[in-house]
């Protein structure tokens, strides 16, 4: 049974907002439920539950879907999330393009638009492109839009709401979220957004506490605790790829030596496999690597196994500190070969403390490439209740 730790059974205003988010997520995960079932699952008393559901019904987040007759006692009114009647704008920043989408609360992508981005774009040009795509999406929406969530490959300073680093697009550095022309607007790194998406729509639907690991060109992790990523601090952390494994190792993009990414990022695996970076883009290099792996090429298999072992070791150290009960794995590197995941599992078994390992579940993402966009929608949903 889904248990939410009783943390929602508090009448403090912040706890009330958490009750609201908890109820919405539960209705999203389980489908229509009666107030009685909701109160039991959320560990709330009837009065608190009635107040929360009344407010959500009034604001249009939840609707009644009829009465279910009971064998004993009174018939129950069933409530369900208004998945399609409310939408959010999700924005996903990549090296060469900005993708925007209208996303319903039940995780459906209603409409998608793309704008090309270039290294030659100035900061003001980038901001204008963001404003343009938000405007176009909001204008075309047929239902109320809650706000905008933005995901990008970098670091956000939550205290000043300023982007302090963005991989591949240095012009994003210094951009203030309040200058992007949308309110409310929330932002988060890809990895954090993917974790929120897994919690609402994916492999972590039935837990409020897990660690998500995202392995691709960069390697990051995000800790979801009590159903949320803690953004009350300046940074959310999660730079697993810059965990130093060997101070005398190869030079990393961050300027230090021996970070996990020097062994386990996609470009490190390509380099160690002897696959030259393709002029026609990273996609063709990956295809070349995949062909080598399929044919059992020893250097390629060894590079993937070494990467998995290194990631497993770094991850085991995190598990020993944070003791998550679940890890959700996502990212392009997992698509390369089963050898990668197998090597991670071996390292976890070897290096996680037995008491923690006994209860540790490792799962793979089910969401695919749209996870960041879906996470952007969750971000704005949660922000709506935090306002
Ligand atoms: Zn580094």
Image (cartoon, helix red, strand yellow):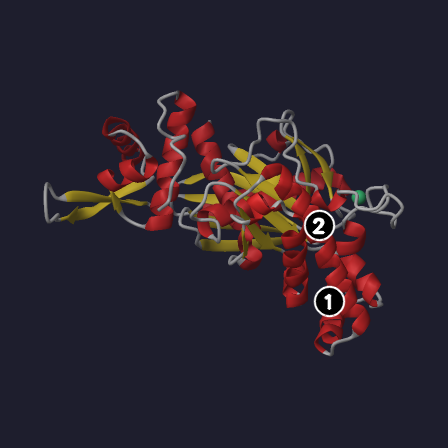
Q: Position of residue 50 (x, y in %)?
A: 24, 31
Residue that numbered label 1 is attached to? 286
* Residue occupying image coordinates x 38% and y 49%: 29
Of 66 and 47, the residue lying toward us: 47
Q: With respect to residue 81, does 110 lie above or below? A: below
Q: Which residue extends farthest front?
A: 354
Residue that numbered label 2 is attached to? 313
Q: Position of residue 131 (x, y in %)?
A: 59, 40
Q: Position of residue 345 (x, y in %)?
A: 63, 57
Q: Which residue extends farthest top?
A: 12
Can residue 116 be seen in the rendering of this structure? Answer: no
* Measured Cα–Cα span from mark 1 to mark 2: 24 Å
Ligand 1's quadrant: top right
The quarter holding residue 82 reads top left
Of 110 and 107, the residue lying toward us: 107
* Residue occupying image coordinates x 63% and y 25%: 159
């Amino acid at each position: 049974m889904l248990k939410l730790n009783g943390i929602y059974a508090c009448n403090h205003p912040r706890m009330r907002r958490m009750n609201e988010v908890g109820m919405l997520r539960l209705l999203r995960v389980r489908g229509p439920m009666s107030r009685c079932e909701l109160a039991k699952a959320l560990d709330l008393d009837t009065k608190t539950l009635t107040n929360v559901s009344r407010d959500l019904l009034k604001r249009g987040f939840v609707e009644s879907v009829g009465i279910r007759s009971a064998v004993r006692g009174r018939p129950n009114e069933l409530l369900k999330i208004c998945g399609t009647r409310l939408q959010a704008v999700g924005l996903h920043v990549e090296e060469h393009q900005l993708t925007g989408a209208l996303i319903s609360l039940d995780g459906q992508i209603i409409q998608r638009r793309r704008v090309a981005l270039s290294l030659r774009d100035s900061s003001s040009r980038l901001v204008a492109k963001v404003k343009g795509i938000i405007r176009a999406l909001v204008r075309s929406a047929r239902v109320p839009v809650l706000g905008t969530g933005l995901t990008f490959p970098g670091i956000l300073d939550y205290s000043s709401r300023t982007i302090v680093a963005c991989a591949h697009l240095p012009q994003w550095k210094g951009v203030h979220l309040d200058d992007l022309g949308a309110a409310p607007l929330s932002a988060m790194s890809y990895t954090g957004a993917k974790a929120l998406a897994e919690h609402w729509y994916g492999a972590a639907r039935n837990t409020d506490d897990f660690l998500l690991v995202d392995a691709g060109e960069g390697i990051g992790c995000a800790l979801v605790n009590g159903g949320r990523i803690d953004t009350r601090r300046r940074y959310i952390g999660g730079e697993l790829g810059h965990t130093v494994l060997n101070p005398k190792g190869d030079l990393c993009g961050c300027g230090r030596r021996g970070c996990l990414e020097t062994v386990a990022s996609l470009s490190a695996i390509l380099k160690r496999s002897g696959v030259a970076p393709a002029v026609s883009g990273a996609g063709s290099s990956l295809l070349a690597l995949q062909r080598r792996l399929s044919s059992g090429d020893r250097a390629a298999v060894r590079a993937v196994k070494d990467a998995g072992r290194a990631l497993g070791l770094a991850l085991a150290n995190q598990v020993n500190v944070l003791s998550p009960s679940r890890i959700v794995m996502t990212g392009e590197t997992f698509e390369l070969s089963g050898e990668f995941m197998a090597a991670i599992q071996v390292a976890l078994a070897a290096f996680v403390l037995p008491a923690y390992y006994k209860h540790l579940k490792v799962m793979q993402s089910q969401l695919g490439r749209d996870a960041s966009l879906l996470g952007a929608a969750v971000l704005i949903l949660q922000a709506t209740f935090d306002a």
